[in-house]
Image (cartoon, grey):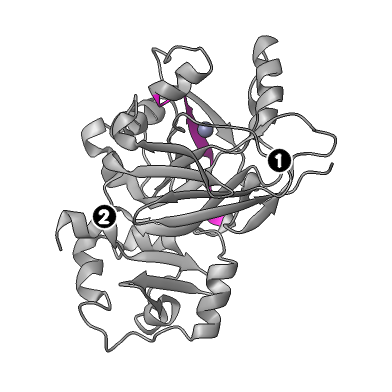
Amino acid sequence: MSEAALQADPPRIYRGKRLVLQQGGAFWDLGAFLERRGQPTHLVDLFETGWLDGSSLEPLLPSNQPEPWQPLDPEEEAALLRAPALPIRPRAVGKILALGKNFRAHAEEFGEKVPSDPLYFNKLPETLVPSASTVSPPPGYTDRLDHEVELAVVIGLGGREIAAEDALDHVAGYTLANDLTLRTLQGRDRREGRPWLRSKNFDGACPLGPCFVPRDFFDPSRVHLTCHVNGELRQDASTEDWVVDLPRAIAHLSAHMSLYPGDIILTGTPAGVGPLVDGDRVVCAAPGIGELVTLIQRPA
Ligand code: ZN
């Protein structure tokens, strides 16, 4: 498979009632496939067995040997696309670390400079919700709430002091995140020297999905990220414009704290963040991963 083909149509793994594999426009019952082979059916466990490696997975794909695969029935496929689960099991999620101001143009839209040292903060695992979720800001908050499309990286192999040249070996795969932010509160807290914790963490503040793409089938260094609100393009950039690339981000983070399987790294949002109002439909997208949809509900 050529690199361009990998990026355009990689195998995508969804969690519905069980794991589902999408390839070549068709959906296949991955859960049943794994069970018949006595394999674990959780992504982080699968990573540990090496099953998600390109060399193991590619020969098994439906495009290469369709016989052992059971297509998903159309009703189940429709239900999966209407309401996909989180790409990784909530209890398998560790910490969520997020890079701030990792696109120069985004730092500049707030009149700020790119930090000389990578800036990061955290989101709590309890903020995760799947694609197609409806999210509201906390009760009583009527100020600005912003969308932020980001490439999300799932760690498969833990470690500390990971060298940049080994960093991608620690990645299980990729998905998308919408780093929802209470922007007015963030500005107020920042002026008062308070942490970003509460402006970045509320129920539903981290939509994640819609699916998981195994590491070897995806190139994180040139991902075209977009965010549309009600069909209008708001964010549009490539990860080629990252200030700190993924290998260096993993090296930096793991020099400071150990990373564990199931940890998630949000890699920063491009310019174009903006406010969301009641009824907005936010679509964060990247070729190869698909669309992460968030519906916004705000009391009048
Ligand atoms: Zn962000």
Where residue 185 appears, as percent x and y from the top left, is 71, 24
Mark pair 1, 2: CA separation: 34 Å
Residue 115, quarter of the rendered image: top left
Q: Residue 96 colored magenta?
A: yes
Q: Would you say 17 lies left or right of 104 here? A: right
Residue corresponding to mark 2: 7
In primary-sequence order, the first of circles 1 and 2 is 2
Residue 47, quarter of the rendered image: bottom left
On the question of residue 17 being in view, the answer is no
Q: Which mark is residue 277?
A: 1
| Disc 1 residue: CB within 8 Å of ligand 1 | no
Above/below status of 237 relative to 80: above
* Callout 1–callout 2 Cβ contact below 8 Å: no
Q: Residues within 10 Å of mark 2 (few under 14, many from 20)?
A: many
Where residue 204 appears, as percent x and y from the top left, is 67, 47
The front one of 73 and 262 is 73
Badge 1 element: loop
For the residue marked with disc 2, what is the amino acid? Gln
Q: Residue at x 41, y 38 (%)?
A: 236
Above/below status of 107 relative to 98: above
Q: Residue at x 59, y 32 (%)?
A: 274
Residue ranking furthest to the bottom: 67
The quarter of the rendered structure image containing the N terminus is bottom left
Region rendered in magenta: 91-103
Residue ranking furthest to the front: 232
For the residue marked with disc 1, what is the amino acid? Val
The front one of 140 and 17 is 140
Q: Residue at x 36, y 39 (%)?
A: 159
| Disc 2 residue: CB within 8 Å of ligand 1 | no
Where residue 119 appears, as percent x and y from the top left, is 47, 21
Q: Residue 110 colored magenta?
A: no
